[in-house]
């Protein structure tokens, strides 16, 4: 089910989702986590796919609902 899939989400991917939930852009996330914008986007894309979400907003909503982020 959904919980099996969520286990595969990395700590970094969750950090990026959490920062997105707080309203940060990819550029801001990259700066905060000392990543390239490309890498920040990659983490967000991967976590979005792992959550079976259509976009970042839905990924954030699912992560919140599943208790993966607060």
Image: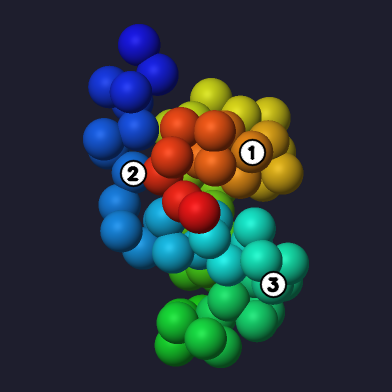
Residue designated by label 2? 9
Q: Which residue is depicted at the point 51% across and 40% down?
A: 63
> Which quadrant of the figure has residue 59?
top right
From this view, report whether residue 35 is shown above or below residue 5.
below
Q: Which scheme is used to colour this image of the protein?
A: rainbow
Return the disc, 2 or 1, that comes first in the chain's sequence.
2
Is residue 46 in sight in this rendering? no
Secondary structure under tag 1 reads helix
Residue 6 quadrant: top left
**Mark closer to the observer (3, 1):** 1
Q: Tell me which residue sits at (69%, 72%) in the image.
A: 24
Check disc 3 and report its element: helix, strand or loop.
Answer: loop
Image location of residue 4, percent across then percent down:
27, 22
State the image coordinates of residue 42 (x, y, percent, origin top left): 50, 57
Q: Which residue is mark 1?
A: 61
Q: Earlier in the sequence, mark 3 or mark 2?
A: 2
Count neighbours of disc 2 (C-alpha within 10 A) and say few if under 14, some if 14 to 19, many if 20 or more: some
Labels 2, 1: front one: 1
Q: Residues within 10 Å of mark 1 (few under 14, many from 20)?
A: some
Mark drawn on residue 8: none
Residue 11 screen position, x and y as percent = 30, 58
- SS for callout 2: loop
Can the viewer see residue 50 in this picture?
A: yes
Of callouts 3 and 1, which one flags the residue occurring earlier in the amino acid sequence?
A: 3
Q: Nearer the viewer, residue 26 or 61?
A: 61
Identify the residue shown where x is 54% and y is 42%.
64
Q: Between residue 1 and residue 36, name the one nearer to us.
A: 1
Residue that carries the numbered disc 3 in the rendered image: 24
Left or right side of 57 for 7:
left
Q: Give how far across and how far down residue 21 sits, in percent.
A: 64, 58
């Amino acid at each position: 089910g959904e919980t099996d899939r969520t286990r595969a989400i990395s700590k970094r991917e969750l950090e990026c989702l959490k920062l997105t939930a707080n309203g940060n852009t990819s550029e801001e996330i990259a700066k905060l986590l000392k990543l390239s914008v490309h890498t920040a986007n990659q983490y967000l894309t991967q976590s979005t796919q792992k959550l079976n979400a259509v976009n970042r907003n839905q990924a954030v909503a699912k992560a919140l609902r599943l208790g993966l982020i607060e």
